[in-house]
Image (cartoon, rainbow, N blue to C red):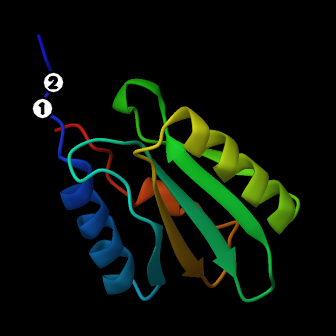
Amino acid sequence: MIEARLKSGLWVRGLMRLAETKGHSAMRLRRGDEDAGAVLIVLTDREGRLALLREAALGAGWERIALEDTQALDTYIERQTRYDPDLWVLELTLEDVTSPIEAELPGRTS
């Protein structure tokens, strides 16, 4: 049986709106394909710390990836873009990047 999945563009806009309603700043860094493409979420805070969320396998929520600096982030995104040219990249600015925001963000499957 095929699971229903939201189109990437609609899902991204929903994620951004949800983050903004929770008081976070949300920005789209890279626009992918409107219908398809994975989504990465860069997490930053005012202390300059970074983390990255990517879709977990089989739509099982989010997987957090720790990053040391912006160079590591840029390298990771570049590598993922070569693998998936339809990739979307969002950035959320939080009070504290270590807070588990992924628990509040819905997955793509219904």
Q: Position of residue 103 (x, y in %)?
A: 45, 54
Element under disc 2? loop
Task: Report the side of 46 relative to 39 (left or right).
Answer: right
Task: Report the side of 27 relative to 8 (left or right).
Answer: right
> What residue would you read off at disc 2?
3
Q: Residue at x 26, y 50 (%)?
A: 8
Give the quadrant of residue 37: top left
Q: Which mark is residue 4?
A: 1
- Proximity of marks 2 and 1: CB atoms separated by less than 8 Å: yes
Q: Residue at x 46, y 26 (%)?
A: 57
Q: Position of residue 53 (x, y in %)?
A: 57, 52
The kind of residue on which mark 2 rests is Glu
Q: Position of residue 70 (x, y in %)?
A: 81, 67
Question: Quick check: 47 above or below 70?
Answer: below
Q: Position of residue 59 (x, y in %)?
A: 35, 32
The kind of residue on which mark 1 rests is Ala
